[in-house]
Amino acid sequence: MKTKSYKKDKVNIVTLGCAKNIVDSEVLLTQLRGNEIDTTHESKKDDANIVIINTCGFIENAKQESIDTILRYADARKEGLIDKVYVTGCLSQRYREELAAEIPDVDDWFGTMELPLLLKKFKADYKHELVGERITTTVSHYSYLKIAEGCDRPCSFCAIPLMRGKHISRPIEELVLEARNLVKNGTKELLLIAQDSTYYGLDIYKKRNLAELLNHLADVDGIEWIRLHYAFPAGFPEDILEVMNNRPNICNYLDMPLQHGSSKILKLMRRGTDRTRTEALVAKIREKVPGIAIRTTLIVGHPGEEEEDFSELMDFVESQRFDRLGVFTYSHEENTHSYNMSDDVPEEVKHERASTVMELQEQISGEINQQKIGQSLKVLLDRKEGRHFIGRTEFDSPEVDNEVYIDAEKHFLRVGDFATIKITDATEFDLYGEPTN
């Protein structure tokens, strides 16, 4: 098939993986457009002649999705449907040489910290004046704010340091500037992300400085919600709890991946803590910030996880009653510390254990949600879908947490606005309600 002829290049960025990748793609989008290159993100049209794929390499399923996507666009290039394919992100950082040998129809491969090199492919310069500015690809009323890159933690199962490098905090002034620019574009909710947000500041300020950052961001006019993600339990900076409690625009919400409830498995995971200290930390957080919603993620099937360890994990989940919880099955990742151990939990057992945890969490979530019936909650309206407006409370992050449904045939609301919603019904993972004003 003959290659299409284009008068001018048009670029489409395809993003896979986590919110940190979304931010990276948004920075790339901003830089390309700042160099007057016609660029879209996740375009539904087939009118781009150059595709940039921002990949994920976190666990096996994510890696396979990235590879499948690369192959699909490489085939399109081979057939002359597009001119060039570039690959960036975590998978490219980690497996560049192997991928280049296996998929020769990709024009070039770039790591996670090679944005200037990627821009050179377009004869574009990295524009430093655009630092702090970002074209967002999420709905306009919320935006991710990446406060740091990389990770210094030694977790046994995690390949992120191999792909993202050492922890690098961004200066407070730069983050405040970016937050102000986001507000100008309609952002009302900031979702703070990093591989380990509680490590923030140790490299550039020589102390954990998340509390100061939160205070500065809370001062930004127009930011009504600030939501904190990915807090590491070991070395948790407890001074942030006072800030969270005192600043009304910091959500009573904390995403804190704990990974397990067995002290033995936590030691094998090299998490720097145990069950007793973890439970004490959770209790202190709940004491210092009354009404806080804690979200956690767990890993089942780590090497060495026996039935008694899983039973301990179940007891941990039942006793702690987390508001939000997600589960991953262990993925045996090359060049991690755990890779030296035998991947001795069969895949079917991993999935059975994950399902068992989520069945328990479904029950806990249902009981917590039932207690919200009759309450009036502040809700940010994310979208209209079918016959419902759908929004979130301060206790819920986009994509992963509960949602609030309001009948759009009975009530008129505006997406992007806040509304006070009286909860009238609840299921295990969703709330239903109606406006009070």
Image (cartoon, grey):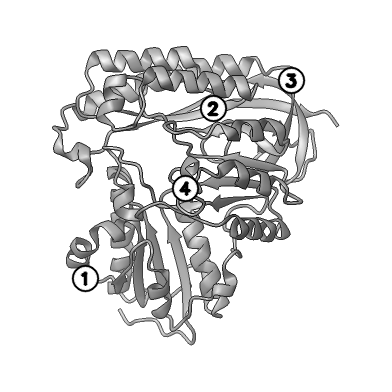
Given contact means CB atoms under 8 Å apart, are the residues at marks 2 and 1 in contact?
Answer: no
Q: Give the percent coordinates (x, y) of residue 297.
A: 42, 31
Which mark, by number, is residue 294?
2
Identify the image quadrant of the N terminus. bottom left
Report the residue at 36% width, 54% height from top.
164
- Between discs 1 and 4, the one toward the N terminus: 1
Q: Give the percent coordinates (x, y) of residue 219.
A: 73, 48
* Cα distance between the residues tagged 1 and 4: 42 Å
SS for callout 3: loop
Which mark, by number, is residue 226?
none
- Is 111 situated left or right of 26 in this image? left
Identify the image quadrant of the C terminus. top right
Q: Residue flagged by tag 2: what amino acid is it?
A: Ile
| Residue pointed to by mark 4 | 202
Nearest the viewer among 339 and 388 is 339
Q: Give the percent coordinates (x, y) of residue 153.
A: 35, 42
Nearest the viewer among 27 and 74 is 27
Q: Residue flagged by tag 4: what amino acid is it?
A: Leu
Which mark, by number, is residue 375?
3
